[in-house]
Amino acid sequence: MAGLDYATLESSSKWRSLPPPPGFSKSSSSSSKTPAKSSASVSASDSYNQLKEKRAWEHAIAPAKALPMQAFMLYMSGGGVQIFSMGIVFMLLLTPFKNIAGMNEAFAQFAPSTSQPRALTTLALQKLVFIVCNLLTLGVGLWKCRSMGLLPMGSGDWLAFETRGVAPEISLF
Amino acid sequence: MRWSLNHLGRACAALLLLVAPPSSALHESDVGVVDWHKLLVGVPLVGAPVTAPAFHTLDRDARTDRTDAVANAGSESVIFTATGNNVLAALNSEDGAVVWRHIYEADDRIAGYYTHSNVLATLSGPGGANFRLFNASNGAIHLEKRLHAPETGHLAEPHHLGTYVAFGGSGDEEIYVLSDGHVVRRLDRNTGEAQWTWTAEDQTSMTVHTHLLYTPSALFLVGLSKSIASFTLHVTALDPRTGAVLRAQGVPSSVKHLDAYLLLSSQNKSKEKAPHLAWLENGVLKSFKLTPKLDAKPSAVTFKPKTKSTLAYERLIDVGLARSGHALAFAGDGSATLLALGDGKVEGVGAFSPTVNPNSKMDGEDGKEKREDDDENTDSIWVGGSGRKDGEVVLGRVYWSHAVNKAKMETLTLTPTGGASPSLQTAVLEVDFDTRSHGIIAHAALSSTQPGSSPSLLLTTSTGAIQLWDLSPTAKEKWTREEALASVVLAEFVELPEGRLDAAGATGRRDGEGFFGRLWRHAGDAQNFPEYLVGFIRRFLTGSYASPTSAPVPVSLSSDSSFQGSFTRDAFGFRQVIVAATVQGKVYGLDSSSGRVVWSRVLGLGWAAETGAKVLPVKMFVLGAEDVTGEDEKLEGRSPEIVLVAQRRSENTLVDTVIFHINAITGADASRVIPNDPELELGEDVSGLLQGIDIIAGPAVEAFLLSPPPASLADSTQDWAKAVLLLDQYLQVYIYPSTPRTRATLRALQPSLHFPLRTNTPNGTRVVGHALGPHPGGNEDDEDEEGMPAFVAHATWTLGLPPDEDVKAMLPSIRGPVASLGKVLGNRTTLYKYLNPRLFVLLTAPRPAAAVEGGDKGQTCGLYVVDAAKGSVVYRTGLPVVVGKGKEAGKDACDVKASLVENWLVYHYYDPEWTGTGLTKGWRVVSVELYEGTGLDEKTMSSDMSSFSDGSVNVVAFEQSYVFPHAITAMSPTSTKFGMTSKDLIVASRNHQIQSIQRRLLNPRRPNRKVTSEEQEEFLVPYDPVLGYDPRRVLSHNYEVANIQRIITSPALLESTSLVFAYGLDMFLTRVAPSNTFDVLSENFNKAQLVLTVGALALAIMFTKPMVRRKKLKEKWYQ
């Protein structure tokens, strides 16, 4: 009985209120089973929501799972400023932003049926974790940038923007 | 100059940079293209016949085995001279090229040179301490011998007094040398061993011997003995073989001075004539026959054509003919008598009146036809030479004729006719001598007339030029050497202005010009367009752009009218004018791309022209083109100008300060445009005497350039102008040019101006800082007044030096654009440069008296880096004193060279200490870098901080010392337009080379171990104490660039490239690119390939475009 019950999928179908085609009539058995069915459909949608939530969690921590792999790639790509290392670093720097920007869209499929699928508040916890994980990725990318010397961290990086005025005393000699 | 990596190695350039210094060196193909070299010898010493220029005919027998340049040139005659730069030189008489030269050390002054067939002997040093024997044709040294220690030599005045060399025997195998006035040696020709030595008993206390004369039977030694009123001649006859005295006796005589006696001898083999000693005694000519026994009696000189009057003679002059028995005696009125060695007596054979009548035959009788106007001609300079025939004598007199304003050369050929008076031929030639650019003739020499060659006249001028004139049939200038360039004291680069368009601009509309007029003008302007178009296409296709290593475009200077137009700067600014001022009172403008003299001016003496004076350049400043007055728009396109501050020392001991204001491009006098009179246009006066402006009646203490602060930082409403500030003895301030604008600039900047002055105090020479204050007697609003100085300097600080130290030199820091405020390390932290713009280097030396007393204990040569506004010492060090021996002690005990640019100080000294462990004596180069605060990332804003603030000397110094293989005579860092390119150090070493030392080798932070990866990022290399000799560092190729006094550098328009000019005895200019020519395409860049590829692609697009369009159309049918 726990098999596939496609009818439940149609519970929210807009076609439901339509009259049956000619020659088809609602079977009485179906009407007699309605209360049982409805309870079953409630439990099914619950489990389905749980499933979706589970999937949403998985999606949220997916960037964190990829980190070891990315770290390995970074390690393999070396410290020099070359096309491969630069590509990986760019990927690391860009994907977090891309992911966060498309976060609501990505999480819409996991949204529980009761809530607005694209709202920011839906699956808020998962989204928060997702953002944190992406920031982790970004952090790894920045760390790589720093180790390659691409981050303006030292005073030397800002030296060119320093200016000096005229000395108050002038030596003629 | 192209310093580049091998193009194959370009790919691994980064790797190379990390592993080893880049293999940069001068490419041989660039030699002579990017650099030039002037081999100079210096201004001849014309004061004495033993140093003055003279012709010498090389011995024919000796010529056969010669393979040098002289033989190849087919020249037989060379000109020898000793010069003021202490150089002995041999010049080719055909083209004036230097055949060979020998440079003497500064303390080894040449006393004289003596030629004999194919060898040349010199004596040099005090009392003729050093004897050298050269091969006259190629300058190879046969022999070098120290006759006595230089400290024990007598210092004589004139320097050649008491020294003489005589050659004897057949050929040159016997050399007799008189040195120190009392020692005669016979030297072995091959070993230099003294075969015998004879020393006068009285050791020059009574008699100074001056001349030697060799005869096979006796060696005559002539000297002067002191007697009561004058000198007595003293003759000693020595045996040439043993040195035994045959006889010594005083000749009863009385001579007044050194020009009053000489020895006459005859080299003529056929008729042996006994040599004579001729002298002047109270205006009377006398002679003494020299025999080994010295038993002759002094006799008066007889005159062959019986002269009517007894002239009172004053001088007896050897015109180069004493060895052939002739000399000239001069009377007080300038008339001359030719003396000839006759049979057993000296005779007067011809007399010449002091003034010359060109139309009259010169003879004894002509004396009565004396011109009434003596001022018409200057005094004659007499020259002599042997004639074509045996016994023939050619005399010449060179004088300046005021009547025709030309120099004239009168040749007198005396041919002995046997018995009677010699026949005399005269000829007068006009010598087209340019007195406006060469001054006056100081010395002349006549070549001996050889069969098949015309006689020539060698002139040495007061401005240091050596000229050779061909005398037959007319006087023609053959060559000129500007030897004054060997005594340049000041030189500056002046950037050329851009090639100017028409004054109104090419497109500007002119007032009152109709349509057709404009059309016509534009058509005229367009006439060069086809040429330009062709040039553009050719350039585009072939890619033959100007490159940093391409040869300079020759400038046509055929006509003076197109002069200024054609002399414009080139694409990269390599063509600049080097203005060089010389001791001889001549200023030159040199083209930096070729070394050619563009213009030259003789500095005028002003009122002192009558009394005679010497103009010594003191300082030279470059004023920009537009900022002199700034109030006349017409002056905007003016050329850059030079202001030369000079000291005029007149003969009557008055010293004046004179300013010469010169247009740097044309050499024209630029001072006349200052009084804002547009009518006085830039003069055509671009040659001749340049008259200066007497600005201070008295010596100037110091002269400074008042340059306004950079325009971007200054108050934009204020109009600034550069000016020269001069301080007289009373520290009153004079300003030149004195225009309202410059005075306003001075008024505006006056409160912030500071400068140090060197002053003499009872405690020794000290440095005293000064500032400007209002003059008590002047009014500050000096809008209109000219005479009264508005400001006077007052002392603000004194530097407390140790009591036994004296100021030796003050060197200003080299100012230029600073590209970076700090040094970024490998870990991205910054060391902020200490960029105090007021720093100067002070070099001190122990006081000579103290040095002797103190026995050099604890004495040091001080080096201080001092702030000029407050006198605070930023960096100081003590360097070892070089202990000399005897007289040399303390003379040059502190030979320290230093150079300060930005925060980088380099100095060079000799370290005699070697006793300690790990020490070695030798020359050191120390590199010091000054940084703000106490270390990393600490900034005190030193470049705009006041000297009076707390942190002004909050400095950390990194320093490292290196051993350098040679002594350095001059050093200077390179300079570039924006200061971004690293600064290499250009040094002139005593081995006559110019080298460039890479900045990274002189980085004082070079680690004393293996470099870490962070240090590798800084391109640091491990410390190596020895800056070894690396031929790749030599910029001067294989030229000999000797005795360089100073090196100046100038930025080109290319940021990567710097021009380097070294001067001293020689001149050398080259281009360097310390960080490689990063701002131009490399020579190997394949422009043709690029053009072909682009062209092929365009062609392909042209063909495929219709094909693609057709295909697209077809596709639409099947959709």
Image (cartoon, rainbow, N blue to C red):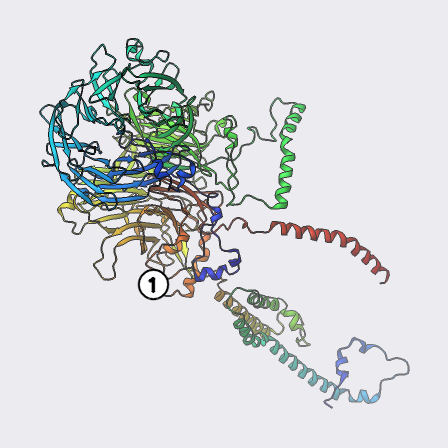
Q: Position of residue A142 (x, y in %)?
A: 51, 66
Q: Is residue B817 left or right of residue B396?
A: right
The image quarter containing residue B643 is top left
Outermost residue toward the front in this view: B270
Mark 1 residue element:
loop
Please tell me which residue lies in front, B562 or B757. B562
Q: Is residue B124 left or right of residue B71?
A: left
Q: Position of residue B435 (x, y in %)?
A: 38, 23
Please state the chain letter of the residue tagged with numbered disc 1 in the rendered image: B
- Is A84 rendered above or below residue B460? below
Q: Is residue B673 left or right of residue B701?
A: right
Instruction: Examine the rendering and report whether any part of residue A26 can be seen.
Output: yes
At 41% from the left and 48% from the top, the residue drawn is: B1035
- Is B1030 rendered above or below residue B739? below
At 15% from the left and 20% from the top, the residue drawn is: B299
Please tell me which residue lies in front, B770 or B452. B452
The image quarter containing residue B302 is top left
